[in-house]
Image (cartoon, helix red, strand yellow):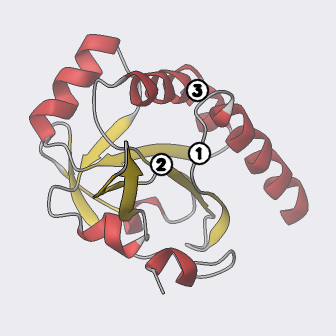
């Protein structure tokens, strides 16, 4: 059974501390009392990953108004993240997980098949973490088109249910 199968809605989100694009440490516990949109993506500067980062950046102020922060995680290093952010003027925080420990905790580091070959890689996934540190919603094998909007709608719906 993969870790992915173990993470369920309502479960406590696995904790982590990773370096951001500037080399500073960021921990999930820094965001208690906020919603966290935690999205995992394969690689900086690829077409799908760029589009996803741009979509989340374009909506970052809307998420902020709803007490949510957006964190993207990939195996790329901090310097790669920094260049990626500058190149596309991204308004989100990117975290580096070169040892793939957080990717594994969240079950998104999996065997993928491409052109008949198998190799490990990041399965594009997003987790909405509620202010109490629990998984409020999750999406696996994400299709980039319209994904940021889907996450926004889920956040709004979750907040309505909590009132």
Q: Is residue 16 visible?
A: no
Task: State which mark lies toward you, 3 or 2.
Answer: 2
Q: Secondary structure at mark 3?
A: helix
Residue at horizontal 23 percent and vertical 63 percent from the top: 100
Residue at horizontal 73 percent and vertical 39 percent from the top: 150
Tell me: 78 left or right of 20: left
Q: Secondary structure at mark 2?
A: loop
On residue 41, the disc is none
Residue at horizontal 62 percent and vertical 46 percent from the top: 67
Q: Secondary structure at mark 1?
A: loop
Tag 3 or tag 1, which sits nearer the N-term? 3
Q: Position of residue 125 (x, y in %)?
A: 52, 53
Where is mark 3, residue-wise?
61
Tags 3 and 2 touching, CB below 8 Å: no
Tags 2 and 1 touching, CB below 8 Å: yes
Q: Is residue 88 visible?
A: yes
Q: Residues within 10 Å of mark 3 (few under 14, many from 20)?
A: some
Location of residue 131 with respect to 117 vertically, above or below: below
Tag 2 or tag 3, which sits nearer the N-term? 3
Find residue 21 and report its image quarter: top left
Q: Position of residue 122 (x, y in %)?
A: 36, 53
Where is mark 2, residue-wise?
124
Q: Position of residue 80 (x, y in %)?
A: 15, 31
Task: State which quarter of the image contains the C terminus.
Answer: bottom right
Location of residue 109 with respect to 152 vertically, above or below: below
Where is mark 1, residue-wise?
142
Q: Nearer the viewer, residue 94 or 98?
A: 98
Q: Position of residue 155 (x, y in %)?
A: 74, 49
């Amino acid at each position: 059974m993969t870790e992915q199968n173990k993470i369920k809605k309502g479960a406590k989100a696995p904790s982590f501390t990773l370096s951001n694009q500037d080399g500073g440490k960021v921990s999930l516990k820094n965001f208690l009392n906020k919603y966290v949109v935690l999205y995992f993506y394969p690689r900086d500067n690829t077409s799908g990953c760029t589009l996803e980062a741009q979509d989340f950046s374009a909506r970052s102020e809307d998420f902020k108004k709803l007490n949510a922060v957006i964190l993207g995680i990939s195996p790329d290093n901090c310097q790669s993240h920094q260049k990626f952010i500058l190149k596309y003027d991204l308004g989100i925080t990117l975290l580096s997980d070169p040892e793939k420990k957080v990717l594994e905790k969240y079950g998104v580091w999996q065997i993928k098949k491409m052109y008949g070959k198998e190799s490990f890689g990041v399965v594009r996934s997003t987790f909405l973490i509620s202010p109490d540190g629990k998984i409020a919603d999750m999406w696996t094998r994400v299709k980039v088109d319209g994904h940021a909007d889907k996450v926004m709608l889920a956040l709004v719906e979750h907040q309505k249910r909590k009132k």
